[in-house]
Amino acid sequence: MFKRIKKALKRSWRQYIRSFREPKLPKVAPSVAEAILPLESDTYTIAPDQLKDMMDKDIHFVLLDVREEWEYQMVHLEDALWIPFGELPRRCGEITPGVEVIVYCHWGMRSLDAAFLLQQLGFKSAKSLVGGIDRWAQEIDPQMLRY
C-alpha cells in the first residue's frame, strides 16, 4: 500500500515540476488591439480606415492626442489637439462639447481609457482609434515615423 502511495506522489510531483518547465501557452494569443476591445466595440472604437474616411469627407470632429509630450513632439496627426492623458480630467473643457471626439495614443490602450473617461464626463461620442498612431502608420501613412 505504501508503494502505491509513494508511486502516486512521485507521479504527481513529476507532473507538477513538468508544468513549470513546459508552460502551456495558448496557440494563438490576441493582438494588443484585440485584447483591449470592449464588447460593444462600435460604441467605443474606430478603425484607422474609418477615421481616414471621416477626414477625407471633411466631417467635423475633434482629434485628441493623449500621449506624453515627447511622443507628441516625435510624431502626431495633423490638427490634433494635444492633452496628455493625466491632464485630461482637468483640461477636458478645452474640447468642443457636442462634437464627436476621436482619441488616439501610441497603441490604443490609453486612448480607450480616455474615451471611457470622456464618455463619463459627458462626451457621449468619444471613440478610441484602434491600434493608435502605430496602426495608423502601418495602414494609412507608411511614411510616418514609428517608435
Image (cartoon, rainbow, N blue to C red):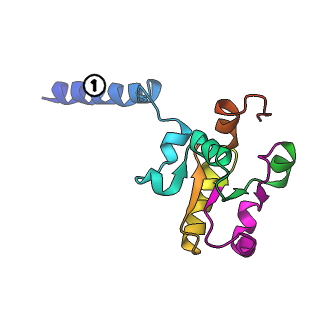
Residue 85 magenta-highlighted: yes
Q: Picture coordinates of residue 17 (x, y %)?
A: 40, 28
Position of residue 142 relative to residue 34, above or below, is above
Mark 1 closeness class: few <14, some 14–19, many ≥20 residues within 10 Å: few
53 to the left or right of 36? right
Q: Quadrant of residue 23?
A: top left
Q: Position of residue 138 (x, y in %)?
A: 67, 30
35 displayed left or right of 143: left
Residue at 44% across, 24% down: 22
Quadrant of res 102: bottom right
Residue drawn at 48 percent across, 48 percent down: 37
Quadrant into which the C terminus falls = top right
Residue linked to disc 1: 11
Boundaries of the magenta span: 75-102
Residue at image coords 53%, 68%:
124
Closer to us: 81 or 99: 99
- In the image, 57: left or right of 116? right
> Does residue 25 sit above or below 99 in this rendering?
above
Residue type, numbered disc 1: Arg
